[in-house]
Amino acid sequence: MKTQFGQAWDLLFDPPIAHRGLWNADGAPENSLAAFQLACEAGYSIELDVHLSADGEAVVHHDYSLRRMTGLEGKIADYTADDLGRMKLKDTEEVIPTLLETLALIGHRAMVHVELKTPFGQVGPLEQRVHDILIDHNGPVCVIGFNPYSHAWFAERFPGVLRGLDSWSWSDEQPHLSKEQRRAFARLEHVTIACPHFLAMSTDTVSDPKVAAYREKGMPVVTWTVRDPAVWETVKPHCDNFIFEGFKA
Protein backbone atom coordinates (compact mmCIF):
# COMPACT_ATOMS: atom_id res chain seq x y z
CA MET A 1 0.00 0.00 0.00
CA LYS A 2 1.23 3.51 -0.81
CA THR A 3 0.60 5.02 2.59
CA GLN A 4 1.46 8.57 1.46
CA PHE A 5 -1.87 8.66 -0.41
CA GLY A 6 -3.89 7.28 2.50
CA GLN A 7 -7.50 6.43 1.80
CA ALA A 8 -7.24 7.51 -1.85
CA TRP A 9 -4.88 4.62 -2.63
CA ASP A 10 -7.21 2.04 -1.08
CA LEU A 11 -10.20 3.48 -2.96
CA LEU A 12 -8.47 2.98 -6.30
CA PHE A 13 -9.47 -0.66 -6.01
CA ASP A 14 -13.05 -0.40 -4.73
CA PRO A 15 -15.79 0.79 -5.12
CA PRO A 16 -16.40 1.10 -8.88
CA ILE A 17 -16.16 4.58 -10.39
CA ALA A 18 -19.22 6.32 -11.85
CA HIS A 19 -18.30 7.94 -15.17
CA ARG A 20 -19.22 11.64 -14.98
CA GLY A 21 -21.36 10.80 -11.97
CA LEU A 22 -24.37 8.53 -11.80
CA TRP A 23 -26.25 10.07 -14.72
CA ASN A 24 -28.80 8.84 -17.22
CA ALA A 25 -30.45 10.21 -20.32
CA ASP A 26 -33.83 10.69 -18.62
CA GLY A 27 -32.57 12.04 -15.31
CA ALA A 28 -29.54 13.81 -13.92
CA PRO A 29 -27.22 14.91 -16.77
CA GLU A 30 -23.56 13.93 -16.89
CA ASN A 31 -21.08 16.00 -14.87
CA SER A 32 -23.87 17.67 -12.91
CA LEU A 33 -24.21 18.17 -9.18
CA ALA A 34 -27.29 15.96 -9.27
CA ALA A 35 -25.32 13.11 -10.88
CA PHE A 36 -22.57 13.46 -8.28
CA GLN A 37 -25.09 13.44 -5.45
CA LEU A 38 -26.63 10.23 -6.79
CA ALA A 39 -23.20 8.60 -7.04
CA CYS A 40 -22.43 9.53 -3.43
CA GLU A 41 -25.76 8.11 -2.25
CA ALA A 42 -25.09 4.86 -4.13
CA GLY A 43 -21.61 4.49 -2.61
CA TYR A 44 -19.56 4.84 -5.80
CA SER A 45 -16.37 6.71 -6.54
CA ILE A 46 -16.71 9.48 -9.11
CA GLU A 47 -14.92 10.42 -12.33
CA LEU A 48 -15.39 13.97 -13.65
CA ASP A 49 -13.80 16.30 -16.20
CA VAL A 50 -12.43 19.81 -15.76
CA HIS A 51 -11.58 22.69 -18.09
CA LEU A 52 -10.39 26.21 -17.47
CA SER A 53 -12.95 28.98 -17.96
CA ALA A 54 -12.16 32.35 -19.52
CA ASP A 55 -11.56 33.82 -16.08
CA GLY A 56 -9.26 31.02 -14.91
CA GLU A 57 -11.68 28.87 -12.92
CA ALA A 58 -11.76 25.07 -13.05
CA VAL A 59 -15.22 24.07 -14.27
CA VAL A 60 -16.72 20.59 -14.60
CA HIS A 61 -17.63 19.64 -18.17
CA HIS A 62 -16.46 16.98 -20.61
CA ASP A 63 -16.52 18.54 -24.07
CA TYR A 64 -14.50 21.54 -25.16
CA SER A 65 -17.65 22.66 -26.98
CA LEU A 66 -20.91 23.65 -25.30
CA ARG A 67 -23.24 22.45 -28.03
CA ARG A 68 -23.91 18.82 -27.03
CA MET A 69 -24.81 19.49 -23.41
CA THR A 70 -26.27 23.01 -23.55
CA GLY A 71 -27.32 23.58 -27.17
CA LEU A 72 -25.27 26.79 -27.18
CA GLU A 73 -22.42 27.76 -29.47
CA GLY A 74 -18.84 28.34 -28.38
CA LYS A 75 -16.34 26.65 -26.13
CA ILE A 76 -15.95 26.38 -22.37
CA ALA A 77 -12.86 28.58 -22.60
CA ASP A 78 -14.89 31.40 -24.18
CA TYR A 79 -17.01 32.03 -21.06
CA THR A 80 -16.49 32.95 -17.42
CA ALA A 81 -17.42 30.58 -14.62
CA ASP A 82 -20.42 32.78 -13.78
CA ASP A 83 -21.60 32.60 -17.40
CA LEU A 84 -21.21 28.82 -17.43
CA GLY A 85 -23.00 28.54 -14.10
CA ARG A 86 -26.15 29.87 -15.73
CA MET A 87 -26.14 27.45 -18.66
CA LYS A 88 -28.72 24.66 -18.33
CA LEU A 89 -27.63 21.09 -19.06
CA LYS A 90 -29.87 19.04 -21.36
CA ASP A 91 -33.08 20.98 -20.65
CA THR A 92 -32.82 20.41 -16.89
CA GLU A 93 -32.32 22.85 -14.04
CA GLU A 94 -28.75 21.58 -13.63
CA VAL A 95 -25.96 23.92 -14.72
CA ILE A 96 -22.21 23.67 -15.35
CA PRO A 97 -20.62 23.62 -11.88
CA THR A 98 -17.16 24.67 -10.79
CA LEU A 99 -14.79 22.10 -9.35
CA LEU A 100 -14.92 24.00 -6.06
CA GLU A 101 -18.72 23.65 -5.89
CA THR A 102 -18.51 20.00 -6.86
CA LEU A 103 -15.97 19.03 -4.22
CA ALA A 104 -17.91 20.98 -1.59
CA LEU A 105 -20.96 18.84 -2.41
CA ILE A 106 -19.06 15.55 -2.43
CA GLY A 107 -16.88 16.22 0.60
CA HIS A 108 -15.35 13.01 1.92
CA ARG A 109 -18.27 10.83 0.77
CA ALA A 110 -16.58 9.62 -2.43
CA MET A 111 -13.19 9.23 -4.05
CA VAL A 112 -12.98 11.72 -6.94
CA HIS A 113 -11.00 11.13 -10.14
CA VAL A 114 -10.44 14.61 -11.60
CA GLU A 115 -9.72 14.31 -15.32
CA LEU A 116 -7.72 17.29 -16.55
CA LYS A 117 -8.77 18.22 -20.09
CA THR A 118 -5.58 20.14 -20.75
CA PRO A 119 -4.87 20.68 -24.46
CA PHE A 120 -1.36 19.81 -25.60
CA GLY A 121 0.86 22.88 -25.39
CA GLN A 122 -1.24 24.51 -22.66
CA VAL A 123 -0.04 22.73 -19.52
CA GLY A 124 0.14 24.80 -16.35
CA PRO A 125 -2.83 27.11 -15.72
CA LEU A 126 -5.47 24.38 -15.30
CA GLU A 127 -3.12 22.21 -13.27
CA GLN A 128 -2.28 25.07 -10.90
CA ARG A 129 -5.92 26.00 -10.35
CA VAL A 130 -6.89 22.38 -9.72
CA HIS A 131 -4.08 21.98 -7.23
CA ASP A 132 -5.06 25.18 -5.42
CA ILE A 133 -8.54 23.69 -4.97
CA LEU A 134 -7.38 20.20 -4.02
CA ILE A 135 -5.15 21.34 -1.18
CA ASP A 136 -8.24 22.51 0.70
CA HIS A 137 -10.34 19.43 -0.10
CA ASN A 138 -10.71 16.98 2.79
CA GLY A 139 -11.80 13.95 0.76
CA PRO A 140 -9.89 11.31 -1.22
CA VAL A 141 -8.92 12.47 -4.70
CA CYS A 142 -6.61 11.83 -7.63
CA VAL A 143 -5.90 13.54 -10.94
CA ILE A 144 -6.14 11.69 -14.24
CA GLY A 145 -5.89 12.64 -17.91
CA PHE A 146 -4.44 11.79 -21.32
CA ASN A 147 -1.81 14.53 -21.51
CA PRO A 148 1.44 13.09 -20.10
CA TYR A 149 2.93 16.55 -19.72
CA SER A 150 0.09 17.47 -17.38
CA HIS A 151 1.11 14.55 -15.17
CA ALA A 152 4.77 15.53 -15.41
CA TRP A 153 3.81 19.02 -14.20
CA PHE A 154 2.26 17.52 -11.06
CA ALA A 155 5.11 15.02 -10.61
CA GLU A 156 7.66 17.83 -10.55
CA ARG A 157 5.79 20.34 -8.41
CA PHE A 158 3.35 18.38 -6.27
CA PRO A 159 4.45 14.72 -6.21
CA GLY A 160 2.14 13.97 -3.28
CA VAL A 161 -0.91 14.17 -5.56
CA LEU A 162 -2.06 10.71 -6.69
CA ARG A 163 -1.93 10.52 -10.51
CA GLY A 164 -3.42 8.16 -13.08
CA LEU A 165 -2.45 8.28 -16.76
CA ASP A 166 -5.35 7.73 -19.17
CA SER A 167 -4.45 5.94 -22.37
CA TRP A 168 -5.92 4.02 -25.27
CA SER A 169 -4.95 2.84 -28.75
CA TRP A 170 -4.37 6.38 -30.10
CA SER A 171 -5.41 4.96 -33.48
CA ASP A 172 -7.70 7.84 -34.46
CA GLU A 173 -6.39 10.93 -36.13
CA GLN A 174 -5.32 13.41 -33.47
CA PRO A 175 -4.47 16.77 -35.05
CA HIS A 176 -2.40 17.85 -32.05
CA LEU A 177 -0.11 14.81 -32.27
CA SER A 178 2.15 13.53 -35.02
CA LYS A 179 1.85 9.95 -36.25
CA GLU A 180 5.09 9.14 -34.43
CA GLN A 181 3.73 10.54 -31.16
CA ARG A 182 0.51 8.57 -31.51
CA ARG A 183 2.43 5.37 -32.11
CA ALA A 184 4.71 6.07 -29.16
CA PHE A 185 1.74 6.75 -26.87
CA ALA A 186 0.03 3.56 -28.04
CA ARG A 187 3.19 1.70 -26.99
CA LEU A 188 2.93 3.40 -23.58
CA GLU A 189 6.24 5.15 -24.07
CA HIS A 190 4.68 8.28 -22.53
CA VAL A 191 4.52 6.55 -19.14
CA THR A 192 8.13 7.61 -18.64
CA ILE A 193 7.10 11.24 -19.24
CA ALA A 194 4.04 11.13 -16.99
CA CYS A 195 5.47 9.11 -14.09
CA PRO A 196 1.96 8.03 -13.00
CA HIS A 197 1.02 5.99 -9.95
CA PHE A 198 -1.58 4.00 -11.89
CA LEU A 199 -2.88 3.53 -15.43
CA ALA A 200 -6.42 4.14 -16.70
CA MET A 201 -6.76 2.11 -19.90
CA SER A 202 -9.62 1.79 -22.38
CA THR A 203 -11.41 -1.56 -22.36
CA ASP A 204 -9.96 -2.46 -25.76
CA THR A 205 -6.35 -1.92 -24.64
CA VAL A 206 -6.38 -3.05 -21.00
CA SER A 207 -5.34 -6.61 -21.91
CA ASP A 208 -2.23 -5.43 -23.77
CA PRO A 209 0.93 -7.24 -22.54
CA LYS A 210 2.60 -3.87 -21.94
CA VAL A 211 -0.18 -2.98 -19.49
CA ALA A 212 0.21 -6.35 -17.80
CA ALA A 213 3.93 -5.73 -17.39
CA TYR A 214 3.32 -2.47 -15.53
CA ARG A 215 0.68 -4.14 -13.37
CA GLU A 216 3.06 -6.97 -12.48
CA LYS A 217 5.53 -4.33 -11.28
CA GLY A 218 2.91 -2.99 -8.86
CA MET A 219 1.19 -0.27 -10.89
CA PRO A 220 -2.60 -0.62 -10.54
CA VAL A 221 -4.77 -0.53 -13.66
CA VAL A 222 -8.27 0.93 -13.97
CA THR A 223 -10.28 0.41 -17.16
CA TRP A 224 -12.83 2.69 -18.89
CA THR A 225 -15.59 3.01 -19.92
CA VAL A 226 -17.57 -0.15 -19.10
CA ARG A 227 -21.14 0.15 -20.38
CA ASP A 228 -22.19 -3.50 -20.02
CA PRO A 229 -21.66 -5.88 -17.07
CA ALA A 230 -20.60 -8.57 -19.55
CA VAL A 231 -17.70 -6.39 -20.65
CA TRP A 232 -16.54 -6.11 -17.05
CA GLU A 233 -16.50 -9.90 -16.73
CA THR A 234 -14.26 -10.03 -19.80
CA VAL A 235 -11.74 -7.38 -18.77
CA LYS A 236 -11.57 -7.72 -14.99
CA PRO A 237 -8.73 -10.29 -14.99
CA HIS A 238 -6.57 -7.53 -16.50
CA CYS A 239 -7.31 -4.66 -14.12
CA ASP A 240 -8.05 -3.62 -10.56
CA ASN A 241 -11.17 -1.47 -10.92
CA PHE A 242 -13.41 0.05 -13.57
CA ILE A 243 -15.14 3.26 -14.62
CA PHE A 244 -18.72 2.57 -15.69
CA GLU A 245 -21.88 4.18 -17.01
CA GLY A 246 -25.34 3.11 -18.13
CA PHE A 247 -25.97 0.49 -15.42
CA LYS A 248 -25.64 -0.02 -11.67
CA ALA A 249 -22.29 -1.65 -10.97
Image (cartoon, helix red, strand yellow):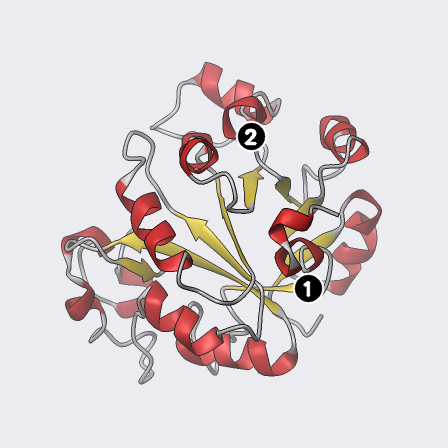
Crowd tier of the residue under label 2, counting other residues whose Cα lies within 10 Å: few below 14, some 14–19, many 20 or above = some
Asked whether 52 or 153 is in front, the reply is 153
Q: Mark 2 points at which residue?
A: 195
> Which amino acid, by three-letter code, is at mark 1?
Pro
Q: What element carries label 2?
A: loop
Q: Residue at 34% x, 75% y: name it.
A: 90
Asked whether 236 or 98 is in front, the reply is 98
Mark 2 vs mark 1: in front: 2
Q: Can residue 142 be seen in this view?
A: yes
Count the numbered circles shown.
Answer: 2
Q: Name the residue under label 1.
A: 16
Q: Where is residue 20 in the image (x, y as percent from the top left)?
A: 49, 64
Q: Residue at 27% x, 61% y: name it.
A: 67
Measured along the vertical axis of the image, is residue 24 above or below residue 137? below
Q: Tell me the quarter of the picture where residue 94 sits.
A: bottom left
Q: Which residue lies furthest to the top in this view?
A: 180
Q: Position of residue 108 (x, y in %)?
A: 54, 72
Q: Is residue 225 visible?
A: no
Q: What element carries label 1?
A: loop
Left or right, 74 with respect to 121, comes to: left
Q: Quadrant of the C terminus?
A: bottom right
Measured along the vertical axis of the image, is residue 78 above or below residue 38? above
Asked whether 212 or 196 is in front, the reply is 196
